[in-house]
Amino acid sequence: MKPSHWLCLLALLFLFPVSPYAAQETSSVEAKIKTLMLDPNTQSPIVVLETVTDKKLLPIWIDVPEARAIALELDHVATPRP
């Protein structure tokens, strides 16, 4: 790695420090898949999650292979293992 790359990396680490306990400080929220749909503008698949406790919706744009895998699981289709 070039020295200039190391300097950039070190600068980023000092500008945006990450706590080693960051993952432990956040709480988890249980969510379930509400629906799988297509973005009407980009035709990209979207999985919409719904939180269990307060019913908030969270859309997540995903790629086609992931959408296919989620759709098969939602339809209870058993696929052969490789």
Image (cartoon, rainbow, N blue to C red):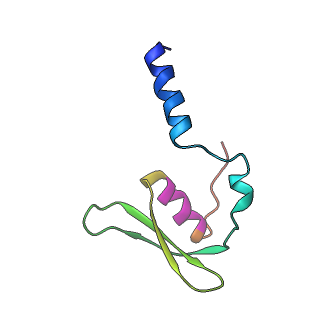
Residue 10 image position (x, y, % from top left): 54, 28
Q: Residue furthest left?
A: 41
Q: Is 9 above or below relative to 58?
A: above
Compare residues 29 and 6 and report the one nearer the observer.
Answer: 6
Q: Give the overall secondary structure of the magenta segment.
A: helix
Determine the image quadrant of residue 29.
bottom right
Which residue is drawn at the image coordinates 33% and 67% (left, top)? 39
Along the horizontal axis of the image, is 42 left or right of 11? left
- Magenta segment: does it hold 69? yes
Task: Please state, as top left, top right, bottom left or bottom right, where the C terminus lies in the image.
Answer: top right
Compare residues 37 and 59 and report the one nearer the observer.
Answer: 59
Along the horizontal axis of the image, is 9 left or right of 41? right
The region drawn magenta spans 66-73
Q: Is 21 above or below relative to 58?
A: above
Figure disc tally: 0
Residue 13 image position (x, y, % from top left): 56, 36
Compare residues 53 and 64 and report the one nearer the observer.
Answer: 53
Which residue is drawn at the image coordinates 63% and 74% (left, top)? 31
Residue 80 image position (x, y, % from top left): 65, 51
Q: Is 2 above or below relative to 32?
A: above
Which residue is drawn at the image coordinates 70% and 54% (left, top)? 23
- Magenta segment: does it hold 65? no
Which residue is drawn at the image coordinates 40% and 62% (left, top)? 45
Compare residues 61 and 25 and report the one nearer the observer.
Answer: 25
Residue 69 image position (x, y, % from top left): 54, 57
Q: Is 35 above or below relative to 6?
A: below
Q: Residue furthest top?
A: 2
